[in-house]
Image (spheres, grey):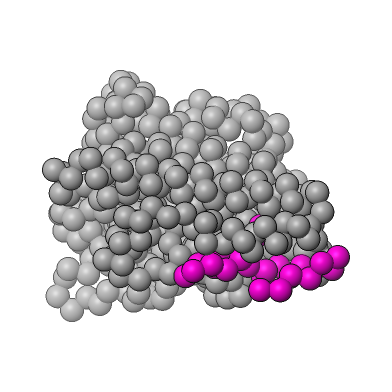
Amino acid sequence: MTFITKKSLSRRTILRGMGTALALPMLDSMIPAMRGQVAKTPRLGFVYVSHGVIWSQWKPTKVGYGFELTPNLKPLEKLNGQFNILTGLSHLEADTKGDGSGDHTRASAAWLTGVHAYDRTRPGVEVKLATTADQIAAGIIGKDSPIPSMELTVDTASQGSCDSGDCFYVNTFSWRNPTTPNMPENQPRVVFERLFGDGGTGAQRLARMKKKASILDSVAREAGSLAASLGNSDRSKLGEYLDSVREVEQRIQSAEKQGEQTLELPDRPIGIPDSFEAHTKLMWDLQILALRADLTRVFSMILARELSGRTYPMIGIPGQHHLISHHRDDKELMSQKARIDTYHVQMLAYLLEKMQATPDGDGTLLDNSLIMYGSGMGNGNLHRHSDMPVLLAGKLGGKFKTGYHLDYKLDTPMANLLVTILGQAGVPIESLGDSTGPLKLDPISV
């Protein structure tokens, strides 16, 4: 590869090695070539948690700017003013229509569609939903990126009986089209190789894993040549980015080593860290690398799927998430559910803080992104799909004001928010699901 010195670099400059193509982060020397457009490249992320929240622990008491952080939101103290809380939004298409479908099934299915999911186990019922908001975005803002969208999860897919007798809808909330779901990936090694490697069959990936060779080793020569042509600031950014890639590689290899030492557990996937927190942070770090290198601009993540049986002994909660969510107003179970919700927000805070600390054009990665976090239920105990928790972080390149609690009339369609997000990201659509029009995000007009 030939690098042009003393001229602007293309945003698509990559380092190549044996079977490897490593995209670069945003450098100062790329800005003239892009005429400042890079700083406004929209990125969208959608993060799902299940079973609603305990509202007294989630919803701010003050409406408008400068609201006080509730117990669930305390992990976001360092990001105060960088996100909005939206209340009053509902997905009424997730309510029952007497067709036999389950509340949990409908919760995740409606979250990015505003469409009712029918029980596909009934005779004559076709497997059909709708193209989700993330995939609508991927078709426009992601069409020029190497990976139009990424779908991730850190919760094990359900294989057993679900509340409608069918687990098909609870293992993903992303649909490429009305009949094709995107099943999320939970293996860090697979995600890493999708971003930086050649992919290949499972046997081929395992063979490469055994070699323990770093992706950076194969691009070292080109990296050195490029560094010599850059200014001090860009050299520092390049070095920091390559260090980040190597650090993530080493963590994946460490997790795989743990897997090798516990092969007596055949059901345990090789390469997934032992702890939920380590797994989540590793997947976040991979996603940040993908965003920094502009390999993808749209992603989704399941932190907790519907009907999740995960336990949280790391925060003193040995019971299963789903069972605890049916607290029946028991104070101890409600306290446990609230602690789980706070822990999930803590995982979100890790992502948002790293995005806020990552330069991107004339701002930060968080400045130029919008991350939507929430659940397909409001009250998990009653399976209510009204007044669902919604958090929006980031300004999407100046398109969103942040720092507000926006409280809408109860049962305002959440699909209105999806239409608004897409429109502000440069993906205008007239309607989605049961939407009735764009949502007003101006704090004065709410």
In this view of the protein, which residue sits in the foreground, 366 or 118?
A: 366
Instruction: Quadrant for residue 258, please give it.
Output: top left
- Above or below, 168 against 273 in this view is below
Image side of residue 351 versus residue 106, left or right: right
Image side of residue 391 versus residue 41, left or right: left
Image side of residue 121 versus residue 253, left or right: left
Q: Is residue 290 in the magenta section? A: no
Identity of the residue drawn at 23% across and 58% down = 167
Image side of residue 389 versus residue 221, left or right: left
Which portion, as a residue range, is magenta? Answer: 1-25
Q: Position of residue 134 (x, y in %)?
A: 50, 64
Magenta stretch secondary structure, dominant: loop
- Above or below, 111 against 341 in this view is below
Identity of the residue drawn at 76% across and 53% down = 234
Whether residue 1 is visible here, answered yes or no, is: yes
Instruction: Quadrant for residue 193, please give it.
Output: bottom left
Identity of the residue drawn at 76% across and 67% down = 9
Identity of the residue drawn at 43% across and 43% down = 251
Q: Position of residue 185 (x, y in %)?
A: 36, 58
In this view of the protein, which residue sits in the foreground, 226 or 75?
A: 226
Q: Is residue 12 in the magenta section? A: yes
In this view of the protein, which residue sits in the foreground, 170 or 101?
A: 170
Q: Which quadrant is home to the N terminus?
A: bottom right
